[in-house]
Amino acid sequence: MKNGYITAFCIKEFLVENLEFDLKFEGNVDFTSTVDRHIFPVLFASEFLDMQVVSVDTKRESVKLKNASWKDLKAIFSLASPYKWRIMLGISFLGISSSIFLLTPRILGKLIDEFDDSKKTSLDPNDKSLQLARYFKNNPLALIGVLFLGGLAIAARVYCMHTAGQLVINNLRKTVFNSVLRQDMAFFDKNKVGEIVSRLSTDALIVGYSVSMNLSDGARALVTCLGSSGLMVYTSPALCKVMFIVIPIIVGSFAIFGKLQRKYTMQMQEAVASANQVATERLSNIRTVRMLVAERKELAAYADKIEEIWRVSKKEGLAKGSMYGSFQFTGYIALSTILFYGSNLIHQGLLTYGELSSFCLYAVLSAASLSNMSGFFLELMKGLGASNRLFELKDRQPLIPLEGGIYKGTVNKEIRFQNVSFGYPERDPLFNDVTFSIPAGKITAVVGASGSGKSTLANLLLRLYDPIDGRILIDDIDLRQVDPSHWRSHVGIVGQEPVLFSTTIKDNITYAVDPNSEEKITDEQIEAAAAQANSLEFIRTFPEKFDTKVGEQGSTLSGGQKQRIAIARALVKNPDVLILDEATSALDASR
Ligand SMILES: Nc1ncnc2c1ncn2[C@@H]1O[C@H](COP(=O)(O)OP(=O)(O)OP(=O)(O)O)[C@@H](O)[C@H]1O
């Protein structure tokens, strides 16, 4: 047990005085040796810096949803371009299956006429489809074989497009996650983590689907629609007149209800993201919820969000139902008219039974493909909406970059806050024109009232935020010119509420050590750091020692144990600057 002598620095406007006092540490954090290694902890204690206290504004702005526009189409399809060969292969299989299934109704029609003795003699023997029909009549197994080939081509197309979609989703998720990880703290102050996770899971899925499987379904619908319409005209131009009456009704109802459905689908995604946010935040803080007996309140908050989903869902269902209903209605009107008018044409000898059958099959195919095309359009719209939000995250440039600048990690003379003014975004200024120095090799304490800005000074020193005015100098070099990641890797910090990850004690202690760095941390160094933080003793009592899993946010450890592991984590990388932000608040005081 050692006593460390610290020098408390106070910000000049309030008190110009150096204080020396006796600091008691439980355990054996050896500050004498750390001072030798030019480590100088900056201790933050809640006492007497009389700074302005600003109330907490809990209302945070979320990622804004903008309306999707066609100009984003290029950007969304460019996501699929790395997988274009896989998509092209899928489209080729589409060509095979579509040719087979488009020609089948015509051949079946000819087969029907082949069995009608009254029509048999009047058929054109040079007609290729008739020749094929006759071949299949004599070799029915060949027809089964061709249809089987069509089925195989469909399976291959679905496989290619499904996997291409997953590759797009994987790539998108990685890119967006990378961009989110690089954002500045002000971004995380504004955007809720639950919403960002929702973007990564749901929106990436929608975008990936819309440019892969949906693209292939859309292409299939288009080919089928064009092919079957052409074959309808070829089979009976007279019957096609009926279609001129029905198509405008189908297109009109699709335009109205499709637009409505798109609107409600976007509202639905927003409502789901909002419900996810509530669930994530409350469940990750379940202990607090339990201790404050807030289960009913949280259930009510979640139920409100679910109620919102239900409200939007009803509108979405109504738009969807109206669209499908109008499709079915117009479809059956068209089919009845075709059969009625077609029977008349047969009676007049202008059409055969086989031709009417083929025409009906093509009409059904073309109606189904119109409906599929509407589905394609809707999915594309959904994809555009979702991509808009994802691109916002992907393309956002952080206010403070992760890398770039002078490689400065050691402090030889001093760290100097020079005329620093700061306020959090959308808040009143927290402090103005603050100047003080932290000399190298010394222990410096900052003390002040709760909420006065002590942790904020640590945030500024780590360059999590930039001062609004003034400079922070590391040996006369402005911190803004220093490579942020390099600087941070030389600063050890133990926060007020130590955050542990749900992995082993060893992984938590070595969390800040770059796995790709040449300098490997040995088990002896880990044990030494744990011993310095006075955690070795209790770690050894666990059956799995350093391989013990600590649970979510270290839930299986006591507050003091968590803090000691956090101290070991800060010490193991042998930092040049050590910041202890009330790091011993959960430790028992003892000599
Ligand atoms: N990310 C943030 N966004 C907006 N305001 C913040 C943020 N973090 C802190 N604040 C506000 O800044 C003020 C200073 O906070 P800070 O955590 O620096 O105080 P502190 O002196 O360390 O307090 P304590 O001793 O209670 O830990 C507080 O009023 C707080 O509400």
Image (tube, rainbow, N blue to C red):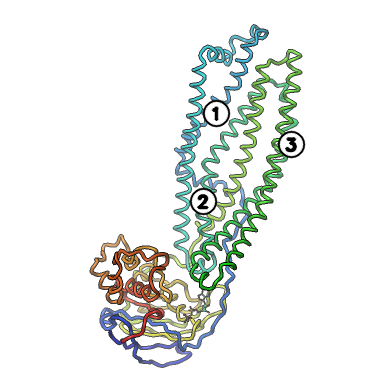
Q: Identify residue for label 2.
A: 204
The amino acid on which the numbered mark 1 sits, given as a three-letter code, is: Ser
Which residue in the structure is indicated by mark 3?
249
Rendered view: 184 above or below 25? above
Q: Which amino acid does label 3 sit on?
A: Ile
Q: Is mark 3 on a helix, strand or loop?
A: helix
Between 25 and 578, the residue placed more toward the observer is 25
183 sits to left or right of 514: right
Which secondary structure, mark 2?
A: helix
Q: Distance between the residues labelled 3 and 2?
A: 35 Å
Snapshot quadrant of residue 320: top right
Question: Could you tell whether 506 is left or right of 365 in the image?
Answer: left
Residue drawn at x 62%, y 44% as measured from the top left: 378
370 in relation to 464, above or below: above
Q: Quadrant of the N terminus?
A: bottom left
509, above or below 207, in the image: below
Q: Give x and y (percent) for residue 296.
A: 59, 67
Horizontal and vertical percent position of residue 240: 71, 25
Residue 366, quarter of the rendered image: top right
Q: Name the residue under label 1.
A: 98
Q: Is residue 350 left or right of residue 196?
A: right
Does mark 1 have its CB less than 8 Å from ligand 1?
no
